[in-house]
Image (cartoon, rainbow, N blue to C red):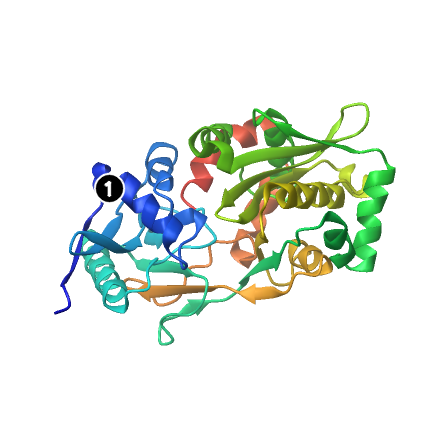
Amino acid sequence: MVSVVKVRPFAEVDSVRWNEFVYACPSATFFHRIEWRGIMRDVFRHNTHYLIAERDSRVVAVLPLAEVKSRLFGHALTSLPFAVYGGVAGDDVEAVAALEAAAEDLARKIGVQHLEYRNLSARHLDWPRQEVYFTFRKEILPDEDANMAAIPRKQRAMVRKGIKNGLVATFDPTPDRFFALYSDNVLRHGTPALSKKFFQTLLSVFGKDCDILTVSTADGKPLSSVLSFYFREEILPYYAGDDLAARDLAANDFKYWELMRHACNRGCRVFDYGRSKAGTGPFSFKKNWGFEPQPLSYEYRLFKRDAIPQNNPLNPKYRAFIALWRRLPIGVANRLGPTLVRNLG
């Protein structure tokens, strides 16, 4: 006789069992790790609603959810804010359905405008879906020379240009150099920066599964930096920033080559370049590295909305805000930014 699926809220005593399940579950991602719950709560001050499905006290599926409530951007229940991937992790069909039913009940109870799942692939073909984002994933070969040969010719020439320019790549113990490059970079694009505290928290919470690589000139001027996550045998370069001088010196190309070399030596088998919007510079950059875009299926259950929210810089209604933000002094932008961006997710 098949045992009954039971769904219940996460409890603190479940932390170890939750992560053990996540590491063993093929459909789980780095963003399903339980540590994100504390980050959502303590850094972003969002209510979290993590759900567990069990059979005979065995965890068979999990669903991380965070509630984002903002006067500017609305009220949502999302799996998961600030993550490229989310939704239910689990292969038990009944358990997955039970978790999604529980999430819908919760969404109605707390009165959100919509429920969002950031799925790797489509699960609900009849739901409204946003497919502006693509992910880029590619195998890392076990040999360094083979990885270099796998880079398309023009991009390989840029990597070699960075090498010839005498650039230096080092891993930083603090987010200081990274944050200076990152915050300046996002300001130039007219978007608010996450807080420096957030990046320090990532390094602290995830330990060996999170690091920062910074590229500088031979005399020590920082040019380009990236914060990466590690999950199972994957590396996920996730947040990055570049100085204006980085392009001419090919520092960005050199950075990702050094990161790939490091990942290869660490035993990683997959390089996950993260998501980008179609038609943007980062999208083209990743394609130039030989990565094929894979559409992400962000699915929505609408309750108090008629259409999917478009809280991203491509939305024309934010053009005036972006233009204004670009003119702010960086100190002012860095003070105001975290308050705004925490509600975007």
Quadrant where the N terminus sits is: bottom left
Observer able to see residue 194: no
Compared with 166, 18 (above or below) is below
Q: Can the viewer see residue 250? A: yes
Judge from the rendering whether residue 58 lies leftward or rightward of residue 149; answer left or right: left
**In this picture, is 218 found above or below 18?**
above
- Name the outermost residue toward the bottom: 126
Answer left or right for 55 relative to 181: left
- The disc labelled 1 sits on which kind of residue? Asp
Percent x, y of residue 164:
87, 39
Residue 249: percent from the left, percent from the top?
A: 82, 39
**Residue plotted at (71% across, 41% down):** 258
Q: Residue at x 23, y 52 (%)?
A: 52
When asked about the image quadrant of residue 28, the answer is bottom left
Identify the residue position indicated by label 1 in the image. Answer: 14
Q: x%, y% of residue 334?
A: 54, 30
What is the total number of numbered labels drawn onto the structure image?
1
The structure residue drawn at horizontal position 56% and vertical position 47%, both measured from the top left corner, is 235
Please tell me whether mark 1 sits on a helix, a strand or a loop. helix
Front-lying residue, 290 or 198: 290
Towards the viewer: 265 or 219: 265
Residues packed near mark 1 inside 10 Å, few (<14), some (14 to 19) or many (20 plus) = some
